[in-house]
Every structure is written in structure tokens, then in C-alpha cells.
Image (spheres, rainbow, N blue to C red):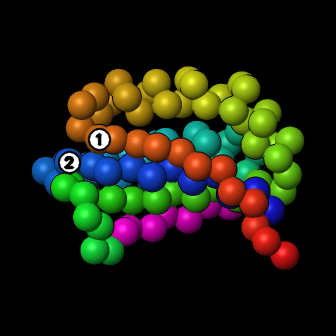
Amino acid sequence: MIVYNETVIVDEAIHRQWLSWMQQEYIPQVMATGHFKRFTILNVLDSPNEGVTFCIQYFADSRENYNKFAAVHLQQLQALHFQKFENQFVMFNTLMKAVD
């Protein structure tokens, strides 16, 4: 199992609007690509950062599925994110593999 994680630190003033947009627009578009089986949204408790920190984790069956997503869809989807909430969040991504 491959986990693609987007950690996003959002300005506190817009975090509800951001979360709603993620749930209603961004995540459905990611899932519609067909490269992930499921996702989860986590709110980081006791984050040392200013703002509100979320982790969105997408689960793929294989590295190949993630690679196809990254090659075809990732740049366009992230551009939408940056356009919608320019200068109101910081994001970094990690790719992980579940240990059996």
C-alpha cells in the first residue's frame, strides 16, 4: 500500500472555507482520477505551526498508480489549490509505503 500525504498548514481565518473546498471539490477530483482506493483527512493536534494543520492521505495499491497520478494530474490539481488559496497556506507532500 502506497500512501501519498499532503500536509497543509492553513491560515486560521480561512481554515473552515478551505476544508469545505477540499471536501467538496479538490478531494473528489483527486479520487475521480481512479488512482487511489480511499482517502482520509486528519487534523494535526498540538501542531507547533501557526494556523491549522491538516494531513490528507490518499491510498494507492501500487507505486505505479501513484506515478500515473503524479505524471498526469498532480500539477494541474495543485495549481487549482494555489489559485484558490494563494498565500494562505503552506503545503508539503510525502510518499510512504505501508510496512507489512
Q: Marks 2 and 1: in contact by CB < 8 Å?
A: yes
Q: Position of residue 72 (x, y in %)?
A: 72, 25
Which span is picked out in magenta? 38-44
In the picture of the structure, the residue carrying the numbered disc 2 is: 11
Residue 71 picture quarter: top right
- Evaluate whether residue 71 shows in this view: yes
Q: Is residue 72 left or right of residue 9?
A: right
Q: Amino acid at mark 2?
A: Asp
Q: Amino acid at mark 1?
A: Phe
Residue in the image at 28% along x and 74% along y:
46
Q: Is residue 40 left or right of residue 13?
A: right
Residue in the image at 28% along x and 28% along y:
86
Crowdedness near tag 2: few (<14), some (14–19) or many (≥20) residues, C-alpha within 10 Å? some
Residue in the image at 49% along x and 31% along y:
78
In the picture of the structure, the residue carrying the numbered disc 1 is: 89
The residue closer to the viewer here, 79 or 49, is 49
Residue in the image at 39% along x and 59% along y:
54
Chief secondary structure of the magenta span? strand
- Above or below, 38 relative to 13: below
- Which numbered disc covers residue 76? none
Q: Is residue 47 left or right of residue 13?
A: right
Residue 44 picture quarter: bottom left
